[in-house]
Amino acid sequence: MANGLTVKKKILVIGAAASPLTRERGQVGLQAGYELHWYSPGGDAVPGAVMYRYPFGSRQVTFLEMFYVLYLLCKVRPAIVHVFYANQRFVNLAASLARRVVVTVMGSDIAEHKLGYRFNAFFVKYLLSSAEVVTSKSSYLDQRLVELGVAAEKINRITWGVDRSVFRMGLDVEALRKQYSIAENNYVVFDVRGCAKLYNHAFILRSFATYLKKHNQNAVLILTRLVELRM
């Protein structure tokens, strides 16, 4: 209480605001009555958040970011720092100094091939060791976190879901079928993953080809982005 007014506690989110998944989760603090502050090098502003951007030119350097995050910790004085993506190298050292740290990991953060690059494993483990809570989205990630030294009681499972008010059976999709020249009796497979090697698009394409051969049914595969894949 200050001058008879209630002072809101603050949350500082460190994560890419360009991701709709990060934006949705990062805004949870607003629903709990916190004042939301958000550091993101790029992306659109998040409604309800005080935004901070990378201030050191167009080329993002995590060593310089570390000092800026330290500055934000002193300026904002957040009750909680929520870090999205654990593999942010020097930024992790600054974020770890917060009073309470929540880390949301993704598969690409703690995949074995990612942590084998230079000092990535050190930075990730350092941040995870200082976290009060680590959120995971699958049993695989739970296991990887335990392997990296995170106590099981610190891991909270928050699995991605589907907005069934948008994606549901019985929708009128005639306009979409016309737009993309998809026949009415064609079965549609939609791959929402980004086109990166770790998402095994080559495997998806082979599986789709096997499905066509086995079932001899008209079907269409839609990828979110065009990418060159070596089969």
Image: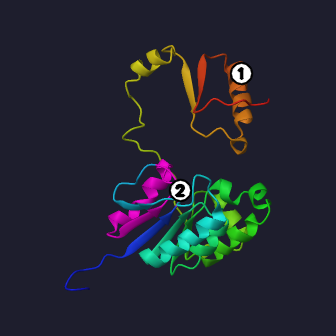
The amino acid type of the residue labelled 2 equals: Pro
What residue is at 69 percent from the left and 64 percent from the top?
143
Image: 84 above or below 220: below
Question: Badge 1: few (under 14), some or many (20 or more) residues near its Cα, within 10 Å?
Answer: few
Check if residue 80 falls in the magenta segment: no
Image: 47 above or below 99: above
What residue is at 70 percent from the left and 29 percent from the top?
205
> Along the polypeptide, which appears first: circle 1 or circle 2?
2
Q: Is residue 186 visible?
A: yes
Q: Is residue 225 left or right of residue 112?
A: left
Give the quarter of the image for residue 119. bottom right
Question: Badge 2: few (under 14), some or many (20 or more) residues near its Cα, within 10 Å?
Answer: some
Give the quarter of the image for residue 135. bottom right
Q: CA distance from mark 1 to mark 2?
A: 47 Å
Residue annotated with mark 1: 214
Magenta region: which residues?
15-43
Q: Residue 16: x, y in percent? A: 53, 55
